[in-house]
Image: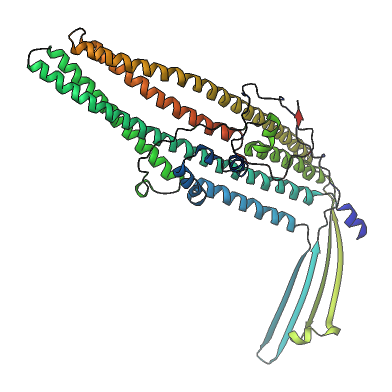
Amino acid sequence: MAATLILSACSFAPQEQTPAVSVPAAWKEAAPQPGWINAEQAMDWHSGQWWRLFGDAQLDALMPQVDVGNQNLAQAVANVAQAQALLRQQRAQLWPTVSASGSSSRAGGGDMATTHGGSVGLSASWTPDLWGKLGDAARAQGASVQASEADLAAARLSAQGSLAQTYFAVREADAEMALLQSIIAGYERNARITQNRYEEGVVARTDALQAQSTLENARANLIALQRSRQQSEHAIALLLGRAPADFALPPQTWTQAVPDVPVGVPSALLLRRPDVAAAERDVAAANARIGVARAAYFPDLTLSGGLSASGTDLLNAMSVPSLMWSLGLSLTQLVFDGGARTAAVDQAIAAHQGATAAYRQTALDAMREVEDQLTALRTLAAQTERVRAAAKASSGAEQRILNSYQAGLSAYTEVVIAQASALNARRSVMQLQLQRQQSAVTLVQALGGGWQVPWGISGTSALQE
């Protein structure tokens, strides 16, 4: 028994080690970090409440509803519970099994006297984990539990990011619709004035038609915006786990803040991205399964024992003189399998190599996503300033050309062109600001949203700077 207990600590799995990933010392596209404005913002980030950095109270109120109603998140929670249950099943195989039985009978017929009988039994068996097969299987499932927990964190971050991006799209649509409504009011005045001037014989019929065409195009754009807003509102309802008919988001002022997201250093990404952490746990699980496959080369030992008794009834059967005991030991060794065990080991090793490659690729993809969003934020900020200057110039040109037309110095075609240019520039400013906010959200997702690996990364060899 002592030898069995000692051998049960064996394992043929390779030493667990996180695969090395080439990680730069700093981000290529990162600008100097201004630091946190206050301690509350830092706390929001590190607690995972990154959306509070945008300073929108309505978004703050919506975000907790994701955990309550989002069905993709509920599925991920169920997957974690399933993985935990499988782990408990796997660990249970390390323990002995005990069973009990009892029976009572009566027999007779014809001239035969009625006889009574009873029996009781208690048996136990245990297959000690001599070669670490069960222990490695439990370790593999434990790593799978951690991977499912990381998948849950990734699903939560994905739902939160989708909610924030869609919410900002709704608020941008509100602002753009308000702009169009004010523009349409001005176009309606211009159309009336131009029609009156046509009826008075001051301008040509084409001027009145162009004014009306400009007005109708603006109205059509407003309808398209309304459709887009409604679809975004429906998407928010779905993210919250509610039917679109049961959800409405009234218009309100758009908070256009684009916060400074703390990017940190690239090496921290391996500990803060849920998908990277899940891929690393997949490597650990594959590593343990190599030990399971190798243990199949060795014999299985089973210890068994039992107590049984029989008598004229159950009470008589349980009396001490009638008890019988038994102890047993069996050893089973597979002699020939046509190379199946070798193939299983090769398959486990190949699966580990595949998981290693997938982990490295996931880490590289994560770093690319961060760099992409850093680039996007920097260029969008510069582009927004240029388009804002263009919008200001276009608005000035529009008013001057309109005055010139009213003075009879310009054709109405010039007015139409100037109005279209000014409107497009003003709408472009809003659309670029939306892209900046959505890129900030995507950067937050790329950085893990303040999430932290709760179990750590094994070893320090995971980084190669």
Q: Quadrant of residue 39?
A: top right
Q: Position of residue 67 (x, y in %)?
A: 52, 49
Location of residue 209 with respect to 138 vertically, above or below? above
Location of residue 66 with respect to 318 vertically, above or below? above
Q: Position of residue 75 (x, y in %)?
A: 54, 48
Q: Position of residue 64 (x, y in %)?
A: 51, 48
Of residues 215 and 315, the one nearer the viewer is 215
Quarter occupied by the N terminus = bottom right
Location of residue 391 with respect to 78 vertically, above or below? above
Residue 155 as seen in the image, left or right of residue 420: right
Numbered label tally: 0
Residue 271 as seen in the image, left or right of residue 8: left
Q: Position of residue 433 (x, y in %)?
A: 45, 27
Q: Residue at x 61, y 37 (%)?
A: 448
Residue lying at the far top in this picture: please name it.
409
Of residues 403 and 465, the one nearer the viewer is 403
Residue 237 as seen in the image, left or right of residue 41: left
Location of residue 445 with respect to 372 vertically, above or below? below
Q: Residue at x 73, y 32 (%)?
A: 353
Q: Residue at x 38, y 40 (%)?
A: 233
Of residues 130 and 414, the one nearer the viewer is 414
